[in-house]
Image (tube, rainbow, N blue to C red):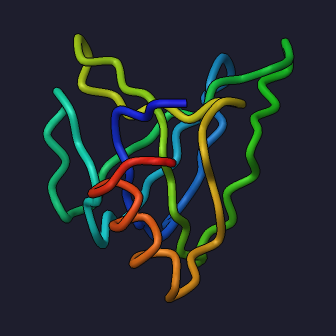
Amino acid sequence: MKYAYVIKARILSAHDKGTHAEVVVKVKKVLKSSKVKIARSNRSIYPESWTNRGCTCPILNPGTDYLIAGQEDSRSSKLLVNMNSLVKPWKAHLGKQVADILRTGCK
């Protein structure tokens, strides 16, 4: 799967907006970006609901750092997270592995 963005981010808060969720993150490192400009600052990401009650997957826990790779909505400048996104709790070795993959591509 090709991702439009790859970031290291700390989850600050999550809010159920009824029809969707909004998660506020602190972007700590931008590993890849596309059309949507991503600054190292606080911003919202938008997990897509997979039920009519607004349940989202993956679960993002406040206070935890994650590697997040996903798609974007360039018209609204939103970073999207859905079932096709990559979301992993951050480990120190992930940064180098992801940088190597982005530089050389998957083989």
Task: Give coordinates of residue 52: x percent, y percent.
Answer: 84, 12
94 to 82, vertically: above or below = below
Q: Residue furthest bottom?
A: 92
Q: Residue furthest front?
A: 107
Q: Picture quarter containing residue 17? A: top right
Frontmost residue, 57 versus 103: 103
95 to 33, vertically: above or below = below
Residue drawn at (67%, 57%), measured in percent from left and top? 60
Residue drawn at (26%, 17%), measured in percent from left and top? 76
Lateral position of residue 90 relative to residue 102, left or right: right
Task: Give coordinates of residue 105: x percent, y percent.
Answer: 38, 48
84 to 42, vertically: above or below = above
Task: Give coordinates of residue 31: x percent, y percent.
Answer: 29, 59
Q: Picture quarter containing residue 13? A: bottom right
Task: Give coordinates of residue 44: x percent, y percent.
Answer: 38, 44
Image quarter hosting the N terminus: top right
Residue drawn at (30%, 72%), measured in percent from left and top? 28
Frontmost residue, 71 versus 12: 71
Residue drawn at (36%, 67%), measured in percent from left and top? 100
How many labels sit on residues?
0
